[in-house]
Image (cartoon, rainbow, N blue to C red):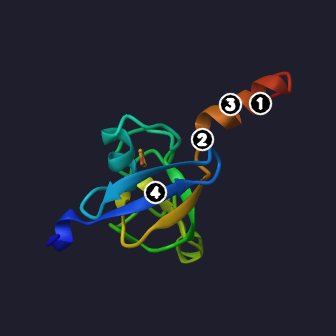
Amino acid sequence: MERAGDETFEVFITDTGESFRCGAGQTLLGGMERLGRKGIPVGCRGGGCGVCKVHVTAGEVRCRKMSRAHVSAEDEARGIVLACRCRPASDIRLAVIGSMDKAFLKHAQAGGAR
Ligand code: FES
């Protein structure tokens, strides 16, 4: 019989169409990294940089306290969270929001206007 701590949930990343299994005791980011998967940008892993920000569109997560500099109370109420601070509590679907790279690339492709 499975103990509660051994439970794993399916995490589906809508941007890439990929999914991975994440343990209930692991953060979404940690679970992804442990399997060598990609999809959610990895930064400080400690809630400080905001690059791992995701929008949980289905399912439930349990989050540790998150910096209001990165996730406002309204964001959190809408399911916008930091993947390095949250663990799955059910199968979930998420969309990646916090990619510094994407923002940077867009800026660069736009000609780097200041
Ligand atoms: S990786 Fe820096 S806030 Fe999550």
Quadrant of the rendered structure where residue 86 is?
Answer: bottom left
Q: Residue at x 45, y 68 (%)?
A: 91
Ligand 1 within 8 angstroms of badge 4 C-beta: yes
Relative to 46, does residue 56 appear above or below in the rendering? below
Select label 4 or label 1 by which is in front: 4
Which comes sooner in the sequence, label 4 or label 2? Answer: 4
Instruction: Name the amino acid type tagged 4.
Output: Leu
Q: Are marks 4 and 1 in contact (CB under 8 Å)?
A: no
Q: Please state, as top left, top right, bottom left or bottom right, where the N terminus lies in the image.
A: bottom left
**Mark 1 and mark 2: span between their CA atoms?**
13 Å
The answer to whether 77 appears left or right of 37 in the picture is: right
Instruction: Name the amino acid type tagged 1.
Output: His
Q: Which residue is mark 1?
A: 107
Q: Which residue is at the far front?
A: 1
Which comes sooner in the sequence, label 4 or label 3? Answer: 4
Instruction: Name the amino acid type tagged 2.
Output: Ser
Quadrant of the rendered structure where residue 67 is?
Answer: bottom left
Question: Horizontal and vertical percent for residue 7?
Answer: 26, 66
Q: Neighbour class for label 1 at 10 Å: few (<14), some, many (≥20)? A: few
Q: Secondary structure at mark 1?
A: helix
Q: Residue at x 35, y 56 (%)?
A: 22
Q: Nearer the viewer, residue 61 or 11?
A: 11
Which comes sooner in the sequence, label 4 or label 1? Answer: 4
Q: Secondary structure at mark 3?
A: helix
Q: State the mark number for residue 99.
A: 2
Q: Which residue is mark 3?
A: 104
Question: Horizontal and vertical percent for residue 2?
Answer: 17, 70
**Mark 4 and mark 1: span between their CA atoms?**
23 Å
Instruction: Name the amino acid type tagged 3.
Output: Phe
Q: Which residue is mark 4?
A: 82
Q: Are marks 4 and 2 in contact (CB under 8 Å)?
A: no
